[in-house]
Amino acid sequence: MTPKTPIMKKFFLIFFLFVVASVFSQTVYITKTGAKYHQETCTHLKHSSISMNLEEALEKGYEPCKVCKPLTTQEKVSVNNVKTETTTESQTTSTTSVQCSGKTKKGIRCKRKTTNTNGRCYQH
């Protein structure tokens, strides 16, 4: 279903601009010495927190915190055929566990599961 009337096209254009503006007007927090930006509830903001817009933080070279996982610029906002989809970095990360590839002292494969990218558990 595609918007056929000029009123529908204007509505979707305004909706798209609103979504983009709300993403970049989000308030994020930085620390005095850090290189990451955070959500307000992040544990890294115990001693200092400086608020700024997401757009400002990105312009200054700050990266998203891996603990609180704030919104990133990898959000995909598309207005193709009345569909709007947003995907944040926290939704795209995979947490599937696999069996550890390490060997025990006896020479048999470890039975623990791990989510590490190197395929080894905390003991290997």
Image (spheres, helix red, strand yellow):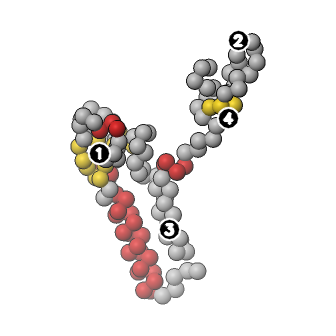
Closer to the observer: label 2 or label 1? Answer: 2
Residue appearing at x 51%, y 82% in the figure: 3
Which comes sooner in the sequence, label 1 or label 3? 1
Which comes sooner in the sequence, label 2 or label 4? 4
Q: Do the residues labelled 2 and 3 touch (CB within 8 Å)?
A: no
- Crowding around mark 1 (Cα neighbors within 10 Å: few <14, some 14 to 19, many 20+) is many
Residue appearing at x 33%, y 36% in the figure: 44
Q: Do the residues labelled 2 and 4 touch (CB within 8 Å)?
A: no
Residue 75 placement (x, y as % from top left): 46, 56
Looking at the rendered structure, the kind of residue marked 3 is Thr
**Quadrant position of the C terminus in the picture:** top right
Give the CA distance from mark 2 to mark 3: 53 Å
Element carrying mark 2:
loop
Residue appearing at x 45%, y 81% in the figure: 9
- The residue under label 2 is 105
Give the CA distance from mark 2 to mark 1: 47 Å
- 43 to the left or right of 109: left
Q: Can residue 74 be seen in this view?
A: yes
Q: Can residue 63 be seen in this view?
A: no
- Crowding around mark 3 (Cα neighbors within 10 Å: few <14, some 14 to 19, many 20+) is some
- Disc ID at residue 84: 3
Closer to the observer: label 1 or label 3? Answer: 1
- Disc ID at residue 100: none
Residue appearing at x 63%, y 26% in the figure: 120
- The residue under label 1 is 29
- Crowding around mark 2 (Cα neighbors within 10 Å: few <14, some 14 to 19, many 20+) is few
- The residue under label 4 is 98
Q: Do the residues labelled 2 and 1 touch (CB within 8 Å)?
A: no
Which comes sooner in the sequence, label 2 or label 1? 1
Which comes sooner in the sequence, label 1 or label 4? 1
Residue 114 placement (x, y as % from top left): 62, 31
Looking at the rendered structure, the kind of residue marked 4 is Val
